Image (spheres, grey):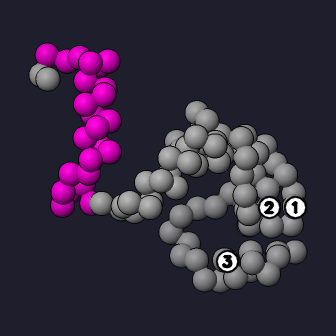
Amino acid sequence: SLSRLAQFGVKHVARGVGRLSTEVLESGSGSYVTTVEGRKMLDFTSGIGVTNLGHCHPAVTKAAQAQVGRLVHGQVNVAFQKPYLDLIESLIPLMPHKSC
């Protein structure tokens, strides 16, 4: 049977995106996720934001916390953001291309 949170999700979240299960995830660490009911599972479905370093990697978490303290979501089609430009500047010498 579905948990109260899963029932709420099934009722109120748009069905436009497919879902593998009705599990309700509470946290993640490394390659594992934990449900609100305490079930720990190996995350075989980790996506682009998790595959390389895992869920909640300390360095990524620290960087994200620092960033959202300055700017949460600066639209790239409205203006440049300094961290984005700094990253490009640091990558140019590592990935030279004739057009640069």
Q: In the image, 4: left or right of 17?
A: right
Element under disc 3: helix
Q: Which mark is residue 35?
A: 2
Q: Nearer the viewer, mark 1 or mark 3?
A: 1
Find residue 71 and name its label.
none
Residue displayed at 44% across by 61% down:
69
Amino acid type shown at disc 1 = Gly
Q: Earlier in the sequence, mark 3 or mark 2?
A: 3
Mark 1 sits on what residue?
38
Q: Amino acid at mark 3?
A: Val
Relative to 68, is 14 on the left or the right?
right
For label 3, the crowd category at 10 Å Cα-Cα, with few meaning under 14, some 14 to 19 and many 20 or more, is few
Q: What's the mark number on residue 10?
A: 3
Residue 7 x/y as whole percent: 74, 80
The kind of secondary structure element at disc 2 is: strand
52 vs 80: above or below: above
Identity, as a three-letter code, of the amino acid under mark 2: Thr
On the image, the x and y values in percent for residue 8 come to 70, 82
